[in-house]
Image (cartoon, rainbow, N blue to C red):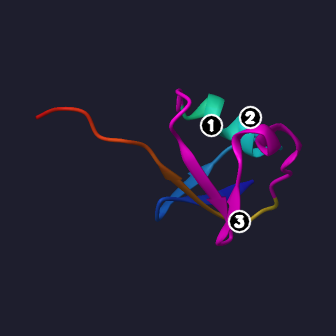
Amino acid sequence: MTYIVNGETIESAAATLADLLTVLEYEGEWLATAVNGELVHREDRPACPLSDGDRIEVLSPMQGG
């Protein structure tokens, strides 16, 4: 399926938001996620199914100084 992740087109077989985050190697407890503009809490990601063309936003804190 094709997803738009942070504005970039991604091809993946991931069926849930949690699966997609694993494939894209997003880790950490401080991620914020949204699918098609709707916030998805961490505990809901494994049960959040994705559909072809979904727009996913992933925000993570920046490190550095």
Quadrant where the C terminus lies? top left
Q: Quadrant of residue 38?
A: bottom right
Q: Secondary structure at mark 1?
A: helix
Q: Which residues are magenta?
A: 25-50
Q: Nearer the viewer, residue 22 or 53?
A: 22
The amino acid on which the numbered mark 3 sits, given as a three-letter code, is Asp
The residue indicated by pointer 1 is 21
| Residue furthest to the left | 65
The amino acid on which the numbered mark 1 sits, given as a three-letter code, is Leu
Answer left or right for 23 relative to 48: left
Graded by Cα atoms within 10 Å as few (under 14), some (14 to 19) or many (20 or more), the crowding at tag 3 reads some
Spatial CA distance of label 3 from label 1 is 14 Å
Spatial CA distance of label 2 from label 1 is 5 Å
The residue indicated by pointer 3 is 54
Spatial CA distance of label 2 from label 3 is 14 Å
The residue indicated by pointer 2 is 19
- Residue 54 place in picture, x, y as percent: 71, 65
Between discs 3 and 1, the one toward the N terminus: 1
Q: Is residue 47 magenta?
A: yes
Q: Secondary structure at mark 3?
A: loop
